[in-house]
Amino acid sequence: MKDQEKLEKELIDFIDHEFYLKKEVTENGFTYFHGEYYADYREELDEKTIQKIIDSDNPMDKFYSEIDELYELYEYNDTWYAYHSEVVKKIRENFDFDEYLEDIQDSVDLDSYIDEFVCERVSFSPDYNHFLRNASVNMNLCTDFYNESNIDFTANFLHLNGIQYRKTLEKGSITWLVKSQGYTMKQFYDYHFNNNNPTDSKFLRSLKEELLNATYSMNLLTFFVKVDLSDILNNNLYDSKGYYHIDKSINCGLYNPWNGSGGCLDIKLEKDIKIHKKNIHSFSYDGALGYGVEATFGVWGGLWQWIKK
């Protein structure tokens, strides 16, 4: 028994010294090692897989299962055998078993002993963090202020195909946005209808263009942000009070996912804003609500920007 314990300790020390593996010791003193498969920097989750993860009831579990499935799909299950065999081979060729050989071979041959020992003490898995580090999502944050959904999001339009339809906006996301940028509705209407823009506001100019170019009465005020998949999986999108912070460099505009239309998607913010989750109608990947912005407008990925942290 003492020889057996001594052999196991020496094998553990050998593995610890010869391989770049993470060493763990359980509460009862059992030592084991863990390593990760090498992941090429070009390996990443495709868009459809990311969407499946986000849509699942338990996104974190789905993420792990998708990575495991990815490895099996491309026959990476053979990778485990290759890594395992490398450890076995190095022990077989470099560890001195001479003083233990007789005891080992009384019960089992040496190769079987090494193989069983490595199976029991060494494990390998995919590099999950690699796929998290390399996964970002183009997200559309669509707002709902003053219960716009009750009127089918028809609060945010003044014109249809460039023709004036009404003189005032109903209370909704656009009226909220105007106030968030430091303007009154009187200032907004004065510029929109009378071209009175004494401060030469880029926000008021761009908002006018957005409303003039909206092609349908139903529209969502939408912010286009790029988000790390890890922030989604770890519920790390909002601050402690439930607000999502958006800096003024983020692109936003009017978007209709139900029939694939909208405005110019080019409202220019002048101030940073924050939106409480209760005022968010949807915050998901492009296309989750129906027609995607990229598919509808043919825009490139640069429309979605990282939030400055």
Image (cartoon, rainbow, N blue to C red):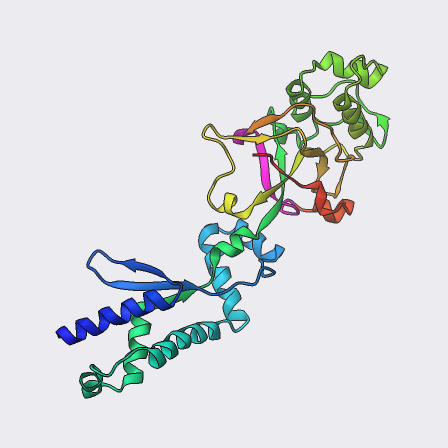
Q: Is residue 141 magenta?
A: no
Residue 248: where, in percent of width, then height? 66, 28
* Residue at image location 19% in from the left, 59% down from the top: 28
Of all residues, the one furthest to the left in this rendering is 1
Q: Is residue 37 above or below residue 89?
A: above
Residue 130 higher or lower than 18, as above or below: above
Q: Point out the image quarter for the N terminus.
A: bottom left
Residue 285 falls inside the magenta stretch: yes
Residue that appears at 31% across and 77% down: 95
Residue 130, position as x, y percentages in the image: 51, 56
Q: Is residue 266 visible?
A: yes
Q: Residue 122: which quarter of the image?
A: bottom left
- The magenta region covers 276-289
Instruction: Check the image and report above or below for 72 versus 159.
Output: below
Which residue lies at the image location 46% right of the left edge and 58% below the top edge? 64
Query: Relative to the observer, which residue lies in front, 160 or 280?
Result: 280
Q: Residue at x 50, y 61 (%)?
A: 67
Q: Is residue 36 left or right of residue 70?
A: left
The C terminus lies in quadrant: top right
Q: Pinpoint residue 199: horizontal percent, then vertical percent.
A: 78, 14
Closer to the camera, 19 or 210? 19
Q: Is residue 158 visible?
A: no
Name the spot of residue 265 as percent of width and height, x first: 75, 35
